[in-house]
Image: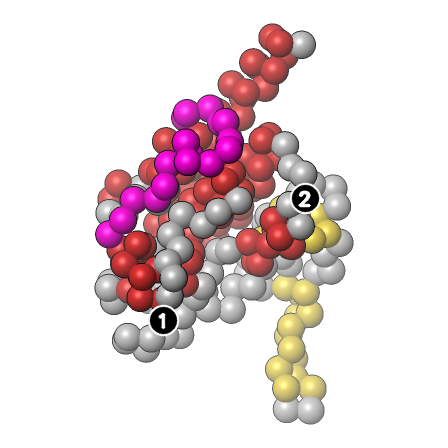
């Protein structure tokens, strides 16, 4: 509720009804990114980049307030009817040094979790950068970067294998976009973007370049 940002769903109040706790949140008119991906809803490259930029902006604000989301995935990203983006479900967010998980307990969505989360290392904001990189990869290729036949093989890919290059898919994007995606997905978090804001800036540069090229072609 302390987070007041255009890219984060607003929590107005909380209470309890018949011994069940509840939150009063902002009503959002739109669709989850998960449903858009599942339906192969047509999105332009600029729209895809903008979605991730807005996610990064929301995360950057949350990180500045000491909150790590820890469950960034398409199902927790709402694309509103006006095209704007809201991050929802901070249910397993980590506040400062307080955590809602126990040692050895996996909390989050497997395909979007960074390698360090499986190695019982303390998480920081770069975990959200990684998860956002997975979403970006999925937006651009309509495939997950690390997906095995079972949980064990998926974990092995996340921890030790590189994601398939964009050339394996029937897509054509500016090469800088793949560089950004791979940087966000780096196994070593020291090799990732240090902040969500830095990732947003890199994406904005690609976005601006793409706009300029489109204007020239026109």
Q: Nearer the viewer, mark 1 or mark 2?
A: 2
Do the numbered discs 1 and 2 sit on residues whose CB atoms are within 8 Å?
no
The image's colour scheme reads secondary structure
- Left/right placement of residue 215 relative to residue 55 reads right
Residue at x 51%, y 69% (from the top left corner): 91
- The location of residue 193, given as percent across then percent down, is 34, 40
Q: Nearer the viewer, residue 110 or 172?
A: 172
Residue drawn where x is 43% and y is 66% of the image? 108
Q: Tell me, yes or no, if residue 162 can be seen here.
A: yes
Q: Kindly report the secondary structure that dominates the magenta region of the rendered protein.
A: loop
173 inside magenta stretch:
yes
Relative image position of residue 17 (x, y in whole percent): 69, 86
Q: Is residue 218 magenta?
A: no
Asked if residue 215 is positioned above or below residue 26 in the image, the reply reads: above
Nearer-the-camera pick, 73 or 173: 173
Q: Quadrant of the C terminus?
A: top right
Q: Which residues are magenta?
A: 160-176
- Residue 41, which numbered label? 2
Quadrant position of the N terminus in the picture: bottom right
Tell me the residue that label 1 is attached to.
Answer: 106
Provide residue 8's location: percent of width, then percent of height. 59, 53
Mark 1 neighbour class, 10 Å CA radius: few under 14, some 14 to 19, many 20 or more: few
Image quadrant in which you'd find residue 199: top left
Residue under the image location 53 percent in, 26 percent down: 207
- Is 17 left or right of 109, judged from the image as shown? right
Which is more toward the observer, 108 or 148? 148
Please, is residue 201 above or below residue 154 in the view?
Answer: above
Image position, residue 147 (x, y; %): 40, 55
Q: Is residue 202 visible?
A: no
Q: Residue at x 56, y 58 (%)?
A: 76
For label 2, the SS is: loop
């Amino acid at each position: 509720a302390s987070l007041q940002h255009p890219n984060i769903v607003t929590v107005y109040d909380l209470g309890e009804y018949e011994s069940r706790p509840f939150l009063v949140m902002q009503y959002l008119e739109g669709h989850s990114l998960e449903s858009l991906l599942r339906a192969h809803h047509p999105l332009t490259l600029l729209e895809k980049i903008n979605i991730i930029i807005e996610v990064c902006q929301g995360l950057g604000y949350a990180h500045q307030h000491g909150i790590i989301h820890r469950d960034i995935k398409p199902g927790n990203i709402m694309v509103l009817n006006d095209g704007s983006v809201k991050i929802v479900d901070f249910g397993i967010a980590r506040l400062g040094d307080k955590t809602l998980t126990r040692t050895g307990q996996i909390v989050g969505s497997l395909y979007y979790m960074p390698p360090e989360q499986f190695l019982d290392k303390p998480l920081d904001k770069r975990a959200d950068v990684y998860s956002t990189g997975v979403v970006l990869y999925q937006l651009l290729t309509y495939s997950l970067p690390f997906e095995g036949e079972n949980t064990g093989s998926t974990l092995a890919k996340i921890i030790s294998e590189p994601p398939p290059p964009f050339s394996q898919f029937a897509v054509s994007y500016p090469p800088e976009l793949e560089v950004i995606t791979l940087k966000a997905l780096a196994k070593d978090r020291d090799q990732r973007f240090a902040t969500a804001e830095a990732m947003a800036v890199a994406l904005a540069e690609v976005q601006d370049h793409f706009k300029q090229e489109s204007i020239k072609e026109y």
